[in-house]
């Protein structure tokens, strides 16, 4: 049985084995890196030793050139041989400096090199003396000529050059021994690194296999737990969905009842006004009074019809849609203004237009017309007679911005949050003889949003209302 304690122990072993495999792999990698660095250092040392050997060979060759050139000069008196001797001295000085830099802090090699330098300088001093004697002999000095014969016939042989050669051979042998030692060290390091890496990889492989087996067991148990959890969540989800469906049904029933209550309330008011006018009409004895009561009843009936029409349009708008298409806004604005011309003339309210003729948006023409008609109708209803309505269409930050502005009472800040709600009671009232259903702005915003636009209210500077509609440009 997979108890929580057993699962915890298994996870502990899994973590331990994973850490062990990781530690082995990490240790093996570090050791390999160190061995690689040591091999690189050894290779660099080998390269350095080879450069020392090359320089020793060069020094040896220049040493032979030095002795042969001075001997040719003493035998033949050829000035070119003397010049060659001077050049070899410069080359030997350069070779000595390079060897001195290469041997570094190797005390034995530095001692040999210092002894070679002493022998070389002694050889040069002796050569300068013999050159001077040679030059006097060539000038006709009998004593110098006799001394030159003594130099060649009776002088004991010098071991200077042989001593230098022995020292150079010792330097070369020392470097060769060092080269052999480093080669052996490299071989041992490679062999040891191979054994260590193979052993570490074997241990890591064993630990990895154990981790994989443990992971498979844990995965099976996790899958079992996940299936059980999914079944439980599915049952809980079904229960929540059933509860949510019930809540939606209750909310829809409540909203439907609230809507019916509002419709019934408004129709009751309209029908009450009609009945009240008819009752008074039976007792009215003057013609003007009867005419006034008739107008009142007719107005209440018209108001009720308008209210019912708005409710029906809202339902139709929610049930059907209209495809969006590119629409040039300026002609639609003019058509809407022309449709309200009679209302504008009756109230002596001119409509001033400032339209950007180039603005085009992707929208529903009928929906745009409905929004424009509602905003213009409200401006003509709520603003005082004789005032002007201004409609501005312009581009703003990549959008088409339509402003419908009037000089009416505006909307108080406390009522603005409820401005676009259905049947929301507001303090502003339409002018005498005008009626309002309480649905116009709610429907207008709904239609605006259905086509990607946004309808909002702004206070107009200097007093009045400003309704703004913004669409993305097509």
Image (cartoon, rainbow, N blue to C red):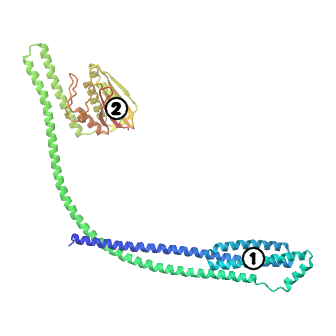
When the figure is inspected, residue 312 is found, relative to residue 75, above or below; the finding is above
Query: N-terminal of the two: label 2 or label 1?
Result: 1
Nearer to me, 113 or 307: 113
Q: Residue 408: image x %, image y %? A: 27, 25
Q: Residue at x 15, y 40 (%)?
A: 256
Quadrant assignment, res 80: bottom right
Q: Secondary structure at mark 1?
A: helix
Q: Which mark is residue 188?
A: none
When the figure is inspected, residue 430 is found, relative to residue 70, above or below; the finding is above
Q: Quadrant of the N terminus?
A: bottom left
Judged left or right of residue 179, residue 467 is: left
The residue identified by callout 1 is 121
Nearer to me, 394 or 88: 88
Real-space Cα separation, disc 2 to disc 1, in angstroms: 106 Å
Q: Residue 366: image x %, image y %? A: 29, 34
Q: Residue at x 41, y 76 (%)?
A: 201
Judged left or right of residue 185, residue 170 is: right
When the figure is inspected, residue 279 is found, relative to residue 155, above or below; the finding is above
CB atoms of marks 2 and 1 within 8 Å: no
Q: Nearer the viewer, mark 2 or mark 1?
A: 1
Q: Secondary structure at mark 2?
A: strand
Q: Residue 176: image x %, image y %? A: 62, 81
Q: Which mark is residue 402?
A: 2
Judged left or right of residue 372, residue 172 is: right
Q: Residue 126: image x %, image y %? A: 80, 78
Q: Quadrant of the C terminus?
A: top left
Label 1 neighbour load within 10 Å: few <14, some 14-19, many 20+: few
């Amino acid at each position: 049985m997979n108890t929580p304690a057993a699962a915890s122990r298994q996870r502990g072993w899994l973590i331990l084995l994973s850490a062990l495999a990781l530690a082995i792999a990490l240790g093996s990698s570090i050791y390999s890196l160190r061995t690689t660095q040591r091999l690189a250092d050894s290779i660099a040392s080998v390269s350095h030793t080879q450069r020392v050997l090359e320089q020793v060979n060069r020094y040896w060759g220049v040493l032979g050139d030095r002795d042969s050139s001075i001997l040719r000069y003493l035998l033949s008196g050829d000035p070119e041989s003397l010049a060659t001797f001077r050049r070899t001295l410069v080359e030997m000085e350069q070779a000595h400096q390079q060897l001195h830099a290469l041997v570094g802090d190797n005390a034995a090699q530095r001692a040999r090199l210092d002894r070679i330098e002493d022998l070389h300088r002694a050889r040069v001093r002796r050569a300068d003396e013999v050159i001077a004697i040679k030059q006097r002999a060539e000038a006709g000095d009998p004593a110098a000529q006799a001394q030159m014969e003594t130099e060649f016939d009776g002088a004991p042989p010098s071991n200077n050059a042989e001593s230098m050669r022995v020292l150079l051979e010792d330097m070369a042998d020392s470097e060769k021994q060092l080269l052999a030692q480093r080669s052996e060290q490299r071989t041992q390091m490679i062999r040891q690194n191979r054994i260590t890496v193979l052993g570490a990889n074997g241990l890591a492989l064993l630990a990895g296999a154990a981790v994989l087996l443990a992971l498979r067991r844990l995965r099976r148990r996790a899958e079992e737990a996940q299936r059980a959890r999914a079944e439980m969540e599915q049952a809980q989800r079904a229960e929540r969905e059933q509860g949510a469906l019930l809540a939606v049904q209750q909310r829809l029933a409540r909203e439907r009842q609230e809507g019916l209550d509002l419709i019934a309330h408004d129709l009751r008011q309209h029908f009450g006004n009609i009945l009240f006018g008819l009752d008074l009409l039976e007792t009215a004895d003057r013609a003007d009074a009867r005419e006034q009561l008739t107008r009142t009843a007719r107005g209440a009936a018209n108001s009720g019809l308008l209210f019912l029409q708005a409710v029906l349009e809202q339902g139709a708008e929610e049930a059907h849609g209209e495809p969006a298409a590119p629409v040039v806004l300026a002609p639609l604005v003019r058509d809407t203004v022309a449709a309200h011309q009679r209302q504008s003339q009756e109230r002596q309210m001119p409509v001033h237009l400032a339209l950007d003729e180039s603005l085009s948006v992707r929208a529903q023409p009928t929906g745009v017309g409905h929004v424009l008609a509602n905003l213009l109708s409200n401006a003509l209803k709520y603003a005082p007679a004789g005032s002007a309505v201004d409609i501005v269409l312009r581009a703003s930050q990549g959008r088409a911005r339509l402003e419908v502005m009037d000089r009416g009472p505006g909307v108080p800040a406390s009522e603005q949050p409820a401005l676009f709600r259905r049947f929301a009671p507001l303090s502003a009232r339409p002018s005498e003889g005008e009626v309002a259903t309480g649905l116009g702005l709610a429907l207008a915003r709904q239609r605006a949003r259905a086509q990607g636009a946004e309808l909002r209210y702004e206070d107009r500077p200097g007093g009045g209302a400003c309704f703004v509609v913004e669409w993305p440009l097509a």
